[in-house]
Image (cartoon, helix red, strand yellow):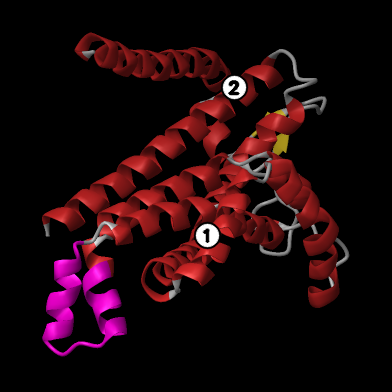
Amino acid sequence: MHAVFFSCGMLAIAFVALITLYIVTAGLPAIGEIGLKEFLLGAEWKSTAAEPKFGILPFILTSFWGTLGAVIIGVPVGVLTAVFLSKVAGPRLAGVVRPAVELLAGIPSVVYGLVGMMVLVPLMMKVFRLKNGTCLLAAILVLAVMILPGIISVSETALNAVPPDYEQASLALGATWMETVFKVSLPAAKSGIGAGVVLGVGRAIGEAMAVMMVAGNVANMPGLFKSVTFLTTAVAKEMSYAGGLQRQALFSIALVLFIFIMLVNGLLGRVLKRGNKE
């Protein structure tokens, strides 16, 4: 069994290594031809023009602000929902809410995008008096809902794993139940909650279909009420008809996205390890 487990672990590492190798070898040629500075810092993407331009700075900034906005909205809601399910709700109420959260996790991305396109986009036009409701804010709201199931599930598991002795000791010292939950249980479960946040960030960065349906897919610099394009959607919307340098540039975008995800996960992992040591 030791050999079986070792083989499975090595197989997973091999898959990651092969994907990394393929993305790097497919993405570097276009960066070398276009130029690293022009590719990363260029503000114009005109891949099909007579004189094509391949600047992906708008895509990078859009992905950054879109992910940050989704995390700012989704993490507090997800963590507080996990606290409610784990420490506040009775068994009967939790038995109703928990399956609803699990159902959110099972809904396909295209359904989120369809609901956002049919409900959220017209609402944005009405509330903010926009000519076009497909914008960065709509994408942020859809992503915030999509990352909730992972954050809630992992955070609730971490809260349930907190030893009851911690909470009983806090109550014995005169703390209220809410003080115990927020000052004892949450700090004790922060590593698990952090893992849920990392999972949510990965989902937000890598989502393509739902974002494509509500973001507008225009290569603009990011603005809350402007149609924008994420790194993921830039690849998805053009790959079917791309060829030559354009196709190579799309692989280069995938390489940038891959590095972006690695950096974010590494940074969050280091922050979590530092918090655990403290």
The region drawn magenta spans 163-185
Along the line of sight, the residue nearer the viewer: 47 or 78: 78
Q: Position of residue 117 (x, y in %)?
A: 81, 54
Q: Tell me if I can see residue 151 in this picture.
A: yes
* Residue that carries the numbered disc 2 in the rendered image: 251
Nearest the viewer among 192 and 257 is: 192
Residue drawn at (30%, 53%), measured in percent from left and top?
192
The answer to which of 212 and 82 lies nearer the viewer is 82
| Residue 170 higher or lower than 221, as above or below | below
Please tell me which residue lies in front, 203 or 135. Answer: 203
Split into 4 quadrants, where in the image is the N terminus? Answer: top left
Quarter occupied by the C terminus: bottom left
Question: In this view of the protein, can residue 219 be seen by the observer?
Answer: no
Magenta stretch encompasses residue 167: yes
Query: Element under label 2?
Result: helix
* Identity, as a three-letter code, of the amino acid under mark 1: Arg
| Residue 224: % across, % down | 67, 64
* 264 sits left or right of 204 in the view: left
Query: Where residue 186 appears, x then y in whole percent?
Result: 28, 68
| In contact (CB < 8 Å): disc 2 and disc 1 | no
Question: Where residue 98 is drawn, which disc sits there?
Answer: 1
Q: Position of residue 76 (x, y in %)?
A: 45, 68
Q: Residue at x 19, y 57 (%)?
A: 275
Quadrant of the rendered structure where residue 169 is? bottom left
Quarter residue 39 falls in: top right
Q: Which circle's residue, 2 or 1, is located before the other in the chain?
A: 1
Give the label on residue 235, or none.
none
**Residue positioned 40% across, 76% down in the render:** 88
Residue kind at label 2, given as amino acid type: Phe
